[in-house]
Image (cartoon, rainbow, N blue to C red):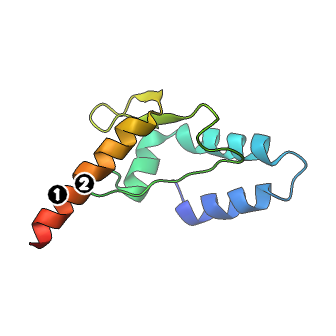
Amino acid sequence: MFDLDRFIVDCRAALATGSPAATVGAIVDRALAAPAEVEAAVNPLQGFTGAIHVYGGDFFGAPRSEWAPDTLEERPFDVERARRAYAQANQRSSMDKA
């Protein structure tokens, strides 16, 4: 079972190693070996979601990936698509409060 608290502790501990990026990469790879467990632990569907971001350096300058919400397939991260999705979610949230 994926343990989010353990994942966070392990990622923070990786910062003290000689190669934090490689160590965090291994931690993420281990977690993503069981994606259904990660999904169950963070319930990333059906509305507003949270995300686990583990990165070092320039977030926008390095290639990134994301998962399509409908198929859960990995795809290249698209900043403009993310901005549109956030704007649409914010608009729906504002309408719900009215």
Residue at image coords 64%, 34%: 62
Viewer-nearest residue: 63 or 52: 63
Q: What element carries label 1?
A: helix
- Residue lying farthest bottom? 97
Comparing 76 with 32, the one in front is 76
Is 71 displayed left or right of 66 in the figure? left
Q: Residue furthest right?
A: 18
Q: Position of residue 42 (x, y in %)?
A: 41, 57
Could you tell me which secondary element the residue under label 2 belongs to? Answer: helix
Image position of 89 (left or right of 22): left
Q: Nearer the viewer, residue 23 or 51?
A: 51
Question: Percent from the top left, x then y, of residue 30?
Answer: 63, 41
Among the 4 quarters of the image, the one containing residue 64: top right
Residue type at mark 1: give it: Arg
> Residue tagged by mark 1?
92
x and y, in percent, of residue 51 in the image: 46, 54
Locate residue 42 relative to residue 91 in the image: left or right.
Answer: right
Residue 74 vertical position relative to residue 46 in the rendered view, above or below: above
Q: Is there a contact, CB below 8 Å, between mark 1 and mark 2?
A: yes
Residue at left offset 78%, top offset 55%: 14
Which of 52 and 60 lies nearest the eye of the viewer? 60
Residue where numbered disc 2 is placed: 89
